[in-house]
Image (cartoon, rainbow, N blue to C red):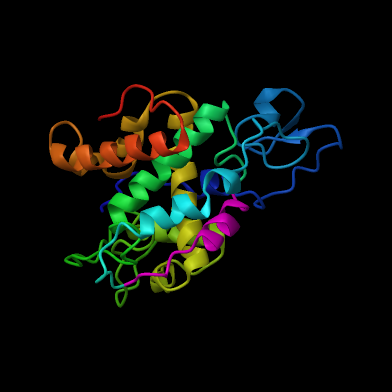
Amino acid sequence: MKHLIIIFALLAAANWASAQNCGCAANECCSQFGFCGTDTTYCGPGCQSGPCTTNGVKVEEVVTDAFFNGIANAAGAECPDRGFYTRAAFLDAVGSFRGFGTDGTADDSRREIAAFFAHVAHETGNLCFREEREKSDKYCDPGFPDWPCNPDKFYYGRGPLQLTWNYNYGAAGRAIGFDGLNNPEVVGTDVGISFKAALWYWMQNCHNAIVSGQGFGATIRAINGNLECDGKKPELVTSRVDLYTRYCGQLGVDPGTNLRC
């Protein structure tokens, strides 16, 4: 998958739960952009620390063993990377990203979880692949001097959301804490980093689309819109939408509107 969305490291750091300490008073929240306050602008979506407000949804109670294993079990017996992705690693990674599955209404949370796993299932073949299957390009864009490519490395898709391109690896590595430009392989070998890289990309590009009510179609556009949306590959869009509506059904939530891009 080719992620062509430009990612700014500063924005990445803002949403990374431990990126900065606002130094707020005890009754204040540290907002997603690093400012102190007490209303929903500070304590609502993206809140990093303090008395952040949530909707009461607990991700671990929504993503049950049955839900997670149901996705993995949908892969064929010949799945090459069966067992790499685990629920425990996912839940551990979620702990580093405040707001995932807890912002907005309770229905928003379930839609977000369904949307995330719909894309994960689509991109990994039901948690079957750690890496992109067609590695035909190094995915090095020299137009990003802050993220210079290592000529000996390849930045093809890896992980649950198939992180791609040097600028995404570089920015994700800086936010999460790995050398994305010189060691991109770790996204496909360390399951913890793998899920954190996926959630980092999600929180930068997809989270607000669900919470703000833009619909599942906006997340498709954010992930692979340049290749699939606007009638380019409607069958792939349909695959993502079918998975999303299926998981919404399993989680007992209406999928909402604007499902396609």
Compared with 39, 49 (above or below) is below
Residue 77: percent from the left, percent from the top?
27, 69
Q: Give the range drawn in magenta.
A: 81-97
Task: Name the residue rendered at 34%, 67% in the picture.
Answer: 130
Lateral position of residue 129 relative to residue 67, left or right: left
Above or below, 251 against 161 in this view is: above
Q: Which residue is drawn at 34% across and 71% down?
A: 81
Is 220 contained in the magenta span?
no
Q: Is residue 90 magenta?
A: yes
Residue 145 visible, this angle? no
Q: Quadrant of residue 98?
A: top right
| Residue at position x 44%, y 23% in the image | 213
Q: Nearer the viewer, residue 204 or 92?
A: 92
* Residue sticking out furthest to the bottom: 152
Position of residue 257 measured from the top left corner of the image (x, y, whole percent): 34, 21
Question: Residue reaching furthest right?
Answer: 26
Give the quadrant of residue 73: bottom left
Counting from the top left corner in percent of width and height, residue 240 is at 27, 41
Tally the marks.
0
Foreground residue, 133 or 17? 133
**As rendered, which of 259 and 253 lies closer to the eye?**
253
208 horizontally vs 130: left or right: right
| Viewport quadrant of the C terminus | top left
Whether residue 228 appears in this view of the structure is yes
Please tell me which residue lies in front, 55 or 93: 55
Query: Looking at the picture, how far across and down is residue 111, in whole percent?
Result: 45, 33
